[in-house]
Image: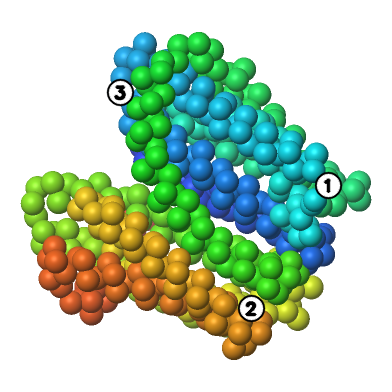
């Protein structure tokens, strides 16, 4: 028994396992937070808060896209002196970016013109303060990733989200939960988290004095290429949010977002499988084994598709139950049907996602960037056409299939140039792999049962 516990603890020390667990835990915590808040705010207020959060995330993509990958590649595995120089240079660049944001923020507060949309107005008023508050925790997160301290990264994220949930529960208890107190609670949780990273030395704030112009130029030169992909990806994820908000209103956006949030439960296995498959895909490519690269693509995307089938069937029958658990007032809305549409299309996600992953593994990130542009265009056009035809969020939900199909066609076309394969083989191999997985699991259980003392 002690040996088994020791084995489990040793596995939990593995940085990849910690990273996967961290993604799952944070997804669950974020879903819990939304589920709590959505019960106590009206649809209109919730819609405004979603716009505020989504736009904060979009603008933060500029900072993260510019610095994160460039920082990790420049920092990881270097000497103590070099890592301090990289950290200090990243600090200085981040401060410059934050100053620009604060100046824009200040100008908006001074001028008499304000945006009519509540969520957009809230963002422009406060985003400068958000970036000041989150700066230390952002740098600390970059350092944690570069040092492969995924346990530390999990602590940073868990403290921020955990404090936010605790503050929300306190506001609910004292009957003070409003849009602004919700925003203020985010400031407090973010501020405490950043202060924690400074006090513990995780943010390495003192290295700012060890910056160098050459390193700052190198970070910027690297980051300017990755920031486009990051911004494009974020715009693709949030295009529905902005279109619904400005064409159908924040109340409708809150309904739509509920279905999107519940879809996060599907994203957990997708992200976990992706993190696990990338190393063997890259290894097979580096060895020149084209057959194995495509076999891994077919194996894991097919296996995950088959595994998702019972989940999709369950969601079709129990979507109303899921909505009822989160908030009863959304039962009379389109939320349950939106979830059903999303879950049905989710059967296409593994193939599209793993094709994109394979393109990265075979050094074709440019193709993924081009594909992303076409997917974004398909999504935006589909949203407008869907709203024009249906006049409600069903049009937007149904249009979701267009970017998925677009991405699959482009990825499949380019992968055929690398190594020809039939798309149907994905599902045949996936079914065979599922059968073998079930047989192996049953055999293992039987072996353990026979070995256990009677």
Please provide percent x and percent y for residue 199: 62, 17
Q: Examine the rendering and report whether any part of residue 327 can be seen.
A: no
- For label 1, the residue is 112
At x 36%, y 13%, the residue is: 80
Which of the 4 quarters of the picture holds residue 320? bottom right
**Residue 278: x %, y % from top left:** 28, 50
- Residue most toward the bottom? 389
> Image point 61% across, 33% down: which residue?
100
Q: Distance between the residues labelled 3 and 2?
A: 49 Å
CA separation in Å, label 1 and label 3: 51 Å
Q: How crowded is mark 3: few (under 14 residues within 10 Å), some or many (20 or more)?
A: few
The disc at residue 393 is 2
Q: Can residue 286 be seen in this view?
A: yes
- In the displayed structure, 418 sits above or below 59; it is below
State the image coordinates of residue 165 (x, y, percent, origin top left): 72, 45
Residue 432: name its quadrant.
bottom left
Nearer to me, 96 or 449: 96
Q: Which dot, 1 or 3, sits closer to the camera? A: 1
Residue annotated with mark 3: 77
Q: Nearer the viewer, mark 3 or mark 2?
A: 2
């Amino acid at each position: 028994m002690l040996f088994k516990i020791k084995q489990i603890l040793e596995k939990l020390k593995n940085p990849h396992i910690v990273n996967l667990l961290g993604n799952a835990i944070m997804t669950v915590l974020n879903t819990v937070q939304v589920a709590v808040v959505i019960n106590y705010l009206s649809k209109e207020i919730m819609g405004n808060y979603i716009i505020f959060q989504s736009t904060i995330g979009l603008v933060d993509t500029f900072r993260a896209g510019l610095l994160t990958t460039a920082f990790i590649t420049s920092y990881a595995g270097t000497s103590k002196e070099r890592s301090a120089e990289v950290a200090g240079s990243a600090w200085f660049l981040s401060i410059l970016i934050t100053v620009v944001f604060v100046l824009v923020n200040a100008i908006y507060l001074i001028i008499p013109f304000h945006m009519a949309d509540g969520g957009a107005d809230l963002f422009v008023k406060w985003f400068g303060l958000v970036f000041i508050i989150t700066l230390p925790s952002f740098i600390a997160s970059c350092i944690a990733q570069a040092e492969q301290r995924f346990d530390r990264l999990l602590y940073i994220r868990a403290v921020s989200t955990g404090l936010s949930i605790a503050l929300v529960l306190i506001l609910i208890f004292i009957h003070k939960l409003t849009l602004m107190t919700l925003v203020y609670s985010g400031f407090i949780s973010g501020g405490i988290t950043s202060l924690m990273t400074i006090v513990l030395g995780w943010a390495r704030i003192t290295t700012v004095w060890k910056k160098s112009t050459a390193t700052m130029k190198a970070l910027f030169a690297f980051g300017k290429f990755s920031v486009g992909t990051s911004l494009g990806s974020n715009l693709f994820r949030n295009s529905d949010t902005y279109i619904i908000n400005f064409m159908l209103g924040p109340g409708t956006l809150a309904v739509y977002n509920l279905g999107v949030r519940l879809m996060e439960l599907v994203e957990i296995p997708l992200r976990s499988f992706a993190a696990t498959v990338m190393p063997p895909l890259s290894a097979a490519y580096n060895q020149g084994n084209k057959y194995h690269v495509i076999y891994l693509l077919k194996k894991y995307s097919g296996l995950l598709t088959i595994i998702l089938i019972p989940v999709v069937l369950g969601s079709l029958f129990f979507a109303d139950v899921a909505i009822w658990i989160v908030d009863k007032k959304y039962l009379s809305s389109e939320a349950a049907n939106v979830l059903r549409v999303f879950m049905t299309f989710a059967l296409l996600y593994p193939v599209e996602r793993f094709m994109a992953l394979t393109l990265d593994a075979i050094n074709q990130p440019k193709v993924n960037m081009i594909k992303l542009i076409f997917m974004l265009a398909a999504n935006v056009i589909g949203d407008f056409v869907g709203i024009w035809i249906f006049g409600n969020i069903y049009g937007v939900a149904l249009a979701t299939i267009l970017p998925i199909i677009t991405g699959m066609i482009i990825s499949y076309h380019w992968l055929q140039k690398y190594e020809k394969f039939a798309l149907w083989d994905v599902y045949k191999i996936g079914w065979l792999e599922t059968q073998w997985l079930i047989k192996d699991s049953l055999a293992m259980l039987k072996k353990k049962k026979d070995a256990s003392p009677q």
